[in-house]
Image: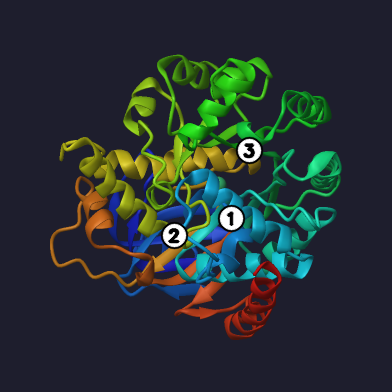
Amino acid sequence: MLIINGTILTFGNDKRVLPDHAVYYENDTIVDIGRTADLVQKYPMAERLDANGKIVMPGMICAHTHFYGAFARGMAIPGQPPANFLEILERLWWNLDRALTLEDSKYSALVCLVEAIRHGTTTLIDHHASPTHIDGSLDVLAEAVLESGLRVGLCYEVTDRNGTQGTADGIRENVRFIKRLQAKPNPKLGASFGLHASLTVGDHTLEDCVESARGLNCGFHLHGAEDKADQVDSLKKYDQRVIERLEDKKILGPKTLIAHAVHLDAYEMGALHNSQTKVSHQPRSNMNNAVGLAEIEKMLDKGITVGLGNDGFSNNMFSEIHTAYLVHRLSKGDPRVMPADRLLDMAFNHNGTIANIYFPKPVGHLAPGALADIILLDYVPFTPLTDGNYPWHVVFGIDGSHVTHTICGGQMLMRDRQLLTLDETAIAAKAKELAKAMWNRIN
Ligand SMILES: [Zn+2]
């Protein structure tokens, strides 16, 4: 496929804005980028897509999400509103996840995948929980992912909050699914070993998980120090801070991804850096749960890989970028913090590194050899758009609503805003029916 007449934003290390350019890809990989006139001559037989001056850029990456939470949208929680993070977990999420059937899990994933394609998010890292139906739940999600054509890394969150059987089932589901993908790999599916969070996983379970993951060549994906309550719990039960405990139990490492990392001390940041553990930042969720704001720039200064996720918020990663851009300034009372270019480095380069835990090929930039994850946007800049200023166009002007075409691994998933792999209307109708039934089971 040859995409011609685009204004290409390459991202990656080059960070170029290339008007009147073309991208040529074969199968799932970009082969060439050059002036439209040159590539039309070079690849005369290629199928063409005329971008007509639209923005052509890499697909967005979401480093941490929860498909399973989709049916929470608009759901009422009986009684007084939850007063803190633990109450939010107990009264919303832990009631919702226990009510999920396998069909609910599948449709929760499908509605998220529709939203992701619409907003140009092509790679997502999911963290799943459905404690009443654990066995096979990752297969059901994988089925939805393959129907959509997007690329997703999956795991099941092991926790002790559903008894010893629930813990054992969660461990087994991770191991089974990791082995399934190792036996029969699929370029659109990845796997890691999921854990909920320090505060719901005892020492014995942590040791069991490390033992079960031995030889599987995988990392862990878990929430860490999201709220102060996680630190309070860890200090009280184990006399260790959260990251210190995870380091001690051998959970940290280059393939491990810690979501949030809001409440860290200097030692914990050092431990994340030394172990090359990855972090994902979800400011919309942190604001919504009122848990605080992570010291993202301190982590970046240290050299920690910090990506951007959505924690189950809309799969429009442009919204996460816009929020991140604003909230750090407000929080610090300093308009110099978290400049747009640094933020986009997180959303593309660092997220690309995190995606590489699951998927080996380069992602998050447009260059020969990178995955053909490409989106087209009908954003029409009314000020100059240059190599030096495009990050500020992204934070102040460009949004997921501008996305007209979404291509993942060379597969066209949306063309001129028409979804090609998923039937949005049918999926929404079925999801609405399932969500209503699920709400009735909870209340
Ligand atoms: Zn999360």
Whether pointer 3 and pointer 2 mark residues with C-beta atoms closer than 8 Å, the reply is: no
**Whole-percent x and y of residue 408?**
56, 61
Q: Nearer the viewer, residue 416 or 310?
A: 310
Q: Nearer the viewer, mark 1 or mark 3?
A: 1
Q: Nearer the viewer, mark 3 or mark 2?
A: 3
420 relative to 22 in the view: left or right? right
Q: Nearer the viewer, residue 7 or 267?
A: 267
Name the mark on residue 221: 3
Residue at image position (24%, 52%) is 390
For the residues marked 1 and 2, what is the alpha-carbon distance in whole angstroms? Answer: 49 Å
Residue at image position (78%, 65%) is 102
Whether pointer 1 and pointer 2 mark residues with C-beta atoms closer than 8 Å, the reply is: no
**Residue position marked by numbered label 2 in the rendering:** 23
Q: Element type at marker 2?
A: strand
In the current view of this chain or complex, which residue is farthest to the left?
Answer: 383
Q: Is residue 274 visible?
A: yes
Q: Which sits earlier in the primary sequence, circle 3 or circle 2?
A: 2
**Whole-percent x and y of residue 218?**
72, 33
Residue 170 position (above or below residue 421): above
Q: Amino acid at mark 2?
A: Val
Q: Amino acid at mark 3?
A: His
Q: Element type at marker 1?
A: helix
**Whole-percent x and y of residue 149?**
64, 65
Toward which corner of the image does residue 258 lie, by quadrant? top right
Name the mark on residue 91: 1
Q: Is residue 1 visible?
A: no
Q: Which sits earlier in the primary sequence, circle 1 or circle 2?
A: 2
Q: Amino acid at mark 1?
A: Arg
Residue 270 position (above or below residue 371): above
Q: Nearer the viewer, residue 241 or 81?
A: 81
